[in-house]
Amino acid sequence: MHRHTARTDGSGPDAEPATDVGAVSEAASASEAEGYEAIRLLLRQAVTRGGLPGILAEVRDGDRQWFGTAGVADTRTGRTRSRQDRFRIGSISKTFVATVVLQLAAEGRLSLDDTAERWLPGVDHGLRHDGAGVSIRMLLNHTSGIFNYTDDQEALNRSETHTPESLVRIAASHPPTFAPGSGWAYSNTNYILAGMIIERATGRTLAEEITERIARPLGLAGTYLPRGSDPTIHGTHSRHYTKLFRTDPGAPVHDATEFDASMFWAAGGMISTAGDLNRFFGALLGGRILPADRQRDMFETVPTRDWISDSAYGLGVSSVRLPCGETVWGMGGALFGSWSYTYGARDGERMFTVNVNGDWSEGGWDDPIGIFTDLLQAWFCRRLHT
């Protein structure tokens, strides 16, 4: 757990949470209307039963869009969440980073078979990891075996601000989880290294590469990677509330909206909106960002372990098999006070993004992922019964 200035606040609104629903761009079919109503109900339940401050969801189905929200963006003022709200997207940042790496590979500026040692010589600093045995592909699909630096909370708490190099040093002070390529384990260190490789290959910052290659061309006005230790979410945004991983219902709630996210950087430091995420993943899944060969690389998956149930992992993207048997593609992310899911159909025509501005759940859901799974099922699985 990192140290940050926290403000104790209320755990949620006193009044019945409002649901604000945007217009659908075209007349919805009866099946779609049923799906929207099911989503509406789950959004309300996430607040009334799950105890969350607020939740928002945006659905895209071809040219049609739907937006809904329940609860509040700010427990002090009672302001409702809006379509324009920005929020921290956590590990969904990994998809942006992997996309930039694959674009560089398509341009011949690096190869997925290049080793970490080639681009970052001596990065392991002679400690326990073998950068010469780890390829860029292994970094992107979490088969490198490199220790996950966020598992060493004591080392992280020694400093408020971190550089990528300091995060790698934390990881390198631990033995690898397994030999490169012989297993799978989710490691944020992999994407810190991938971000460093991008900067070495381009001579520009990772933030600049994401903006110039993805955000600006796609018109993602609310999407960016904060520079340095900037703690602010710029533009309209929801407050982010955290219980600091305490599970008891009476645990104090802290405001974690402003904090130095440098400890996450390429692994999870980005900020975005629901609409931007749907647009980005729709274009990515639909093959409009990467050439066909790099698209195949991205979506070639390996089995996961001790992660999201019924999932597989590609290069910065994952597939999740829903309880009804439908498979969706995308990524999830969680930071203090902000949990998000963006998943869609493999062709990118149907997309679903949901965010909660609290990091706990009650009422039978173990955590917000349970709510997210129910929401995805309500939308994507309805087609199996129509």
Image: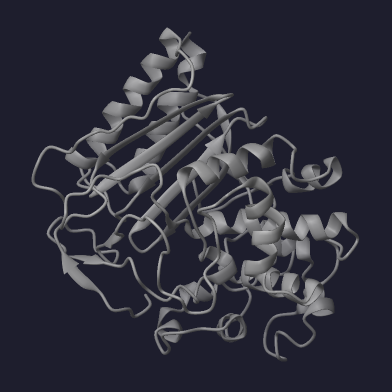
- Toward the right, the furthest residue is 108
> Visible in this render: residue 276?
yes
Residue 189 occupies which quadrant of the picture? bottom right
Residue at the spot x=39%, y=42% of the render? 83
Q: Where 228 falls versus 42 (above or below)?
A: below
Q: Is residue 169 left or right of residue 323?
A: right
Residue 231 occupies which quadrant of the picture? bottom left
Q: Is residue 245 left or right of residue 148?
A: left
Residue at the spot x=61%, y=44% of the render? 280
Task: Please state, as top left, top right, bottom left or bottom right, where the N terminus lies in the image.
Answer: bottom left
> Visible in this render: residue 49?
no
Q: Where 84 falls versus 250 (above or below)?
A: above
Residue at the spot x=79%, y=72% of the render? 202
Q: Where 271 falls versus 304 (above or below)?
A: below
Q: x, y (%) of residue 353?
A: 47, 40
- Toward the left, the furthest residue is 14
Q: x, y (%) of residue 262?
A: 50, 76
Residue at the spot x=52%, y=62% of the render? 270
Q: x, y (%) of residue 72?
A: 23, 47
Q: x, y (%) of residue 342?
A: 51, 42
Front-lying residue, 331 or 59: 59
Q: Where 262 falls versus 34 (above or below)?
A: below
